[in-house]
Image (cartoon, rainbow, N blue to C red):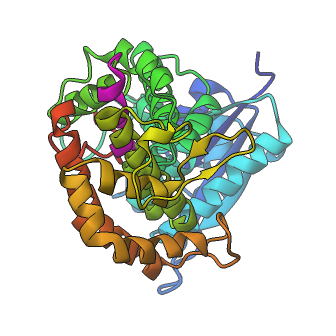
Amino acid sequence: MPTKTLLICTVGGSHQPIVTAITSHQPDYVYFICTGNDPGTGRPGSAIQITGKGSCIKVHPADEKPSLPNIPTQAGLAENQFSVCETLADDLDNIYSACQQAISQAIANFPDCRLIADYTGGTKSMSAGLVVAALENKHVELQLITGNRSDLIKVRDGFESTQFANIEKVRFERLIDPYLRSWERYAYSEAEAGLKKLDSPRVPELKNRLCLLRDLSRAYAEWDNFNHEGAWTILQNYASRLVSKQQQQLLGNLRRLNDQNLEKRDAARLFDLYLNALRRAEQGRYDDAIARCYRLIEWSAQWLLENQCGIKTANIRVEDIPEGVELSQNRDGIYQAGLFAAWQLIKHKTTGVAAQFISQQEKQFLNHLQCRNLSILAHGFEPIKQADWLLFQQWLDKAFIPMLLSETKKSGINGLPLQLPKNYHLA
């Protein structure tokens, strides 16, 4: 249980709400956020209501002379029970900093305190500054003084009461926003790690939403790491809530990536690998992107040969080696085909779109593979530049991917699948 109660108040032209706030909570210490003398006119600000001597406050603004003592005196505060933080009336940055400093000082001086921030008094900028500062600290309770109104100007003196502001949803949205923005960079693991550190909200609706956001971030992180089974295990639990067209398309893509039919599943995984490479490129990781595309080109040849010719490039029968194609044997005497040799087999052993592609694109094919060979992730020492990647991607989009789509059409792939989401939307 908190050992002390602290109050932070913004102070404006009306004293009564501040006195009500103090008498309601009987705080052990009060931080008054006030304005000093106006820089332009020199007229005193609201600080006079705290530090003024003798009669310094008018009962009504229209009164000719002040007749009340300062607010600490009216509220029964001793001199060692309050401090004044002066700021400017409408400089939001300055006000925010003053409020933030007061909150930090309060927590530092009284670590186990109950800290209440009352934003009733002061200018609109002062109220806004205190609210923003309070929202950023989960230990601060936010309140205002309110009551029934007889007009649109103010609550009548004597009819005020304290009311705590319901800010858990606002605070929750502010806390999760940076992590959901990670989705814009496909940084799902980063989002999951950040969301896992957040305390569970007390409101059931928010608690459930936090669990959902964590799970979805984790699911897409697993998908981004090629763990399609793990992603499906998580996402299928939310299938009834993911009902938008985009969400349904993503679920359909994930089903294909986990299909029991290996030909269909691997066809889908080829394009999943390409989308993964595009995500790495968008993150500026061009070496990673090109390495993935190299694997895509190699895997595509392996998939085509196995499904159309029954040839596995890791163990090729002598009778499957056509004239004009030279393959090397490994240490066990087994014939194997690397990337380029596999495409030579496609050219000689098949008659479809893929065979036409390698016959027509062989020179460009080798030129673009050279880009990969110079990468530090292959045989070179220079990082891939954005311009290198863009040329490679243009060739893939114009020549390679259309060919692959033609070859995989019979496996149920009718177009390039949807990219993983950049934004969280729940229908």
Between 382 and 329, the residue placed more toward the observer is: 329
Q: Does residue 38 appear left or right of residue 343 in this picture? A: right
Between 390 and 240, the residue placed more toward the observer is: 390
Residue depicted at x 56% and y 60%: 288
Asked whether residue 170 is drawn in magenta, I would say no
Q: In this view, does 181 lie above or below 46?
A: above
Q: Does residue 263 appear left or right of residue 50 in this picture? A: left
Q: What stretch is highlighted in magenta?
A: 260-272
Residue 128 in the image: x percent, y percent?
A: 44, 54
Residue 68 in the image: x percent, y percent?
A: 55, 49
Q: Please tell me in which quadrant of the rendered image residue 302 appears.
A: top left
- Name the image quarter holding the N terminus: top right
Residue depicted at x 39% and y 51%: 322
Residue 52 in the image: x percent, y percent?
A: 65, 60
Asked whether residue 271 is drawn in magenta, I would say yes
Q: Does residue 299 appear left or right of residue 140 in this picture? A: left
Residue depicted at x 33% and y 58%: 62
Magenta stretch, overall SS = helix
Q: Is residue 55 above or below residue 368?
A: above
Q: Seen from this angle, which residue lies furthest bottom?
A: 40
Q: Is residue 360 visible?
A: yes
